[in-house]
Image (spheres, rainbow, N blue to C red):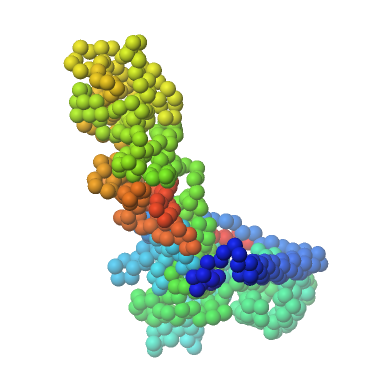
Amino acid sequence: MQKTIGSNGRKISKGNNSIKKDLLQWKLHHWVSDFLKVNVTLLILLFVLVLIGVQMQSICDRLPCHTPKTVEDEYTIKGLELNEKVGDKAPTISSAHLSRSMADAIIRTGGGVTKYSQYIRFAGDGRDPIASGTAFFGRDRRGVVNDYLHFNAKDDIYEYSVVFEKGLHSAIQNNKLTDFVNQPLSLLGDRVYIVDATVDTSNKKLTLKMVDTLLVDLLAEGQEKAYRIGSKVYEVKVLIIDNNNQVKFIVNGHETKNLRKGDVVILPDQTVIGVTEMLLNEAGEGADLVKFYVGSTMLEATDKYSDTDLSYDMRSHRASLHSAKVQYVGAVEGTTFTLSSMKFRAEASSKQGDIYIPVGGSLRQQMLEPDAMFPNNWDLVYNGFGIGDQTRRQGTVPLEFATTGGGYNLFFSNSQGVSYTIPFISAQNTFSYGDGKRLLHFTEAGSSTIYPITKNDIFIVTSQNNGRGTTNVLSYDGIDTATKRLFFRDWALGQKIVPYETTGVAGQEGKTMFNAGGHEYSVFISSAVGNSVAVDLNGDGILSGGEANIVLAGGGRLDINAISGSSAILQLIVPARLLRESRTDEATQITITKNDYSVDIDVPNQGDLQLTAVANKDMLLGQTKFGTLFQITRRKTTSGLFIDFPRKQALASVTIKVQNRLTQ
């Protein structure tokens, strides 16, 4: 909250020491208060981290700490244009993209053997659309303007599906699908156990309970072992294995109840532990063994298996899930149930509604209910457009309209990497291109006997008005008729002295050619006082009123139009050949307007470019589909415009990251 001192309109004068003292004390008080708040928070956080580290170290000093092996598997969806959906670029992800984590697998139950395949879909059909996410530039829910992967609240983010080729079969015994229970599935690189399966044949509903595992191991009775997973250590001890095929554990100081094969229990610290197999030594030689797992999430999902509708009936062992949906497709034949497929969807849901994933951020970090992304070993990471924090960056070309007393200087780099800063437009004297004293010419004369460029004037020459052209900016510094020499100055490269020859044309002193950027340009000289000149500005060999655009490094060009009344219209043009998925040029309009004795600049919202105000700053930011970044800095009279122009189209990407645990 901002506070206003002297809000009654009274000015704080130099003599008003009391008010100044109060203001200083108020500032000092709040500065100290904020400093203490921040530092106390940091100290508490540091203390907690140190405490966790000491506890982990003490456990690992006492026991060997085993780190279950995982392998990172990832696939990057590339080439996202501004406002393009992930699903438009990558409708379906399969084993062809994540070969280690989504490979086809085999499951064997008492009901038979079947192969199964898995898919992540970011695009649905007309009946069941999947919005996926959009590469977006604008303001997030905190008011920060940047590029994000954006999901509208309640939109489906993705669909994860498992398809059983021949169907997963189980006998039905007292509404239980006993052949499903204690069966591991390899889902997205995670070993997932079905711990309970119930079918309600009257209402045609199936309920599955599944646990995704952090580790799977085999321990002997009395054996104790510590496992380090990320920032957490799990200390597991097999307390006893009795003759009734029951086992009791102590996990992180919590003693479990007696567990049998297939049982699972949730401990007070939300750790999930389950038993998959008991290996008893009935001969009394050697130790009894138990195969167990430690899991992160137990998911329970219910759906009507006789239709293809999705149900909001999912919960984790932590809470009900309001942003998760499930679909089972199956059938009952006699006393056998067959599951053909299962699908899971997660809706976009955050504390503020929409989800905005910043560059380097992940979907799971932003989800209000991260358990909806089952299993918990995968994530979506947004890599951005490579734009960063709206600063001059590698791979881009700056273009800047910098304010002067009553106009703008233009800074740009040409296709050869030569940088120019030139007087561009001014409201001093008259509203004109230049600085009010010298005109800036970009339109050539209608013929070789019309001489618009006078001494000290500035002119733009461009070899071609396309991405292959080269632009140079020169001024006409004068003439020596005795030695028949012209004097020009390249605003970046220095002076040019060019000899000329007479032509015999009435009213014409002579003609010549000069070289700029490796290209030749014709010049015709008037014999009148002052010896003004006509220059072939667009390099086509004739003077017929043609125009010279400013061609930028990277292939874009600035098309300058004549001033009309109190406004000048410019266009920043990106040729279609530089755009991956467009057959038309991208043209962005820039408007410069005269206001009394000054000028102001604006970039109206147009097409994909929507300029957004930055919170607490007099600044607007926006990005085009090509990736050109516009930054307007507002001032009372004359605003500034900075443009970051990419050398090639800026495209965003999203990476699916999987911690593959199947190597354990």
Looking at the image, residue 153 lies above or below residue 382: below
Q: Residue at x 50, y 57 (%)?
A: 359
Depth order, front residue of 358/183: 358
Q: Give the residue at the far left of this rendering.
A: 506
Question: Could you say where residue 508 lies in the image, as x and y percent from the top left?
Answer: 22, 17
Q: Residue at x 39, y 43 (%)?
A: 408
Q: Residue at x 34, y 23 (%)?
A: 519
Is residue 235 visible from the viewing direction of this image? yes
Q: Quadrant of residue 277?
A: bottom right
Looking at the image, residue 185 lies above or below residue 526: below
Is residue 101 visible from the viewing direction of this image? no
Q: Residue at x 29, y 17 (%)?
A: 512
Q: Give the residue at the far front of this rendering.
A: 15
Depth order, front residue of 321/659: 321
Question: Could you say where residue 630 lies in the image, as x and y percent from the top left?
Answer: 40, 51
Looking at the image, residue 336 lies above or below residue 413: below
Residue 274 shown left or right of residue 119 in the figure: right
Residue 183 shown left or right of residue 162 in the figure: right
Q: Quadrant of residue 445?
A: top left
Q: Quadrant of residue 132?
A: bottom left
Instruction: Please count the marks in the image.
Output: 0
Question: Could you say where residue 136 lies in the image, as x and y percent from the top left?
Answer: 41, 59
Depth order, front residue of 89/112: 89
Residue 482 shown left or right of residue 159 in the figure: left
Pick the quarter of the image with the C terminus.
Answer: bottom right
Question: Could you say where residue 363 lies in the image, as x and y percent from the top left?
Answer: 50, 65
Residue 541 shown left or right of residue 621 in the figure: left
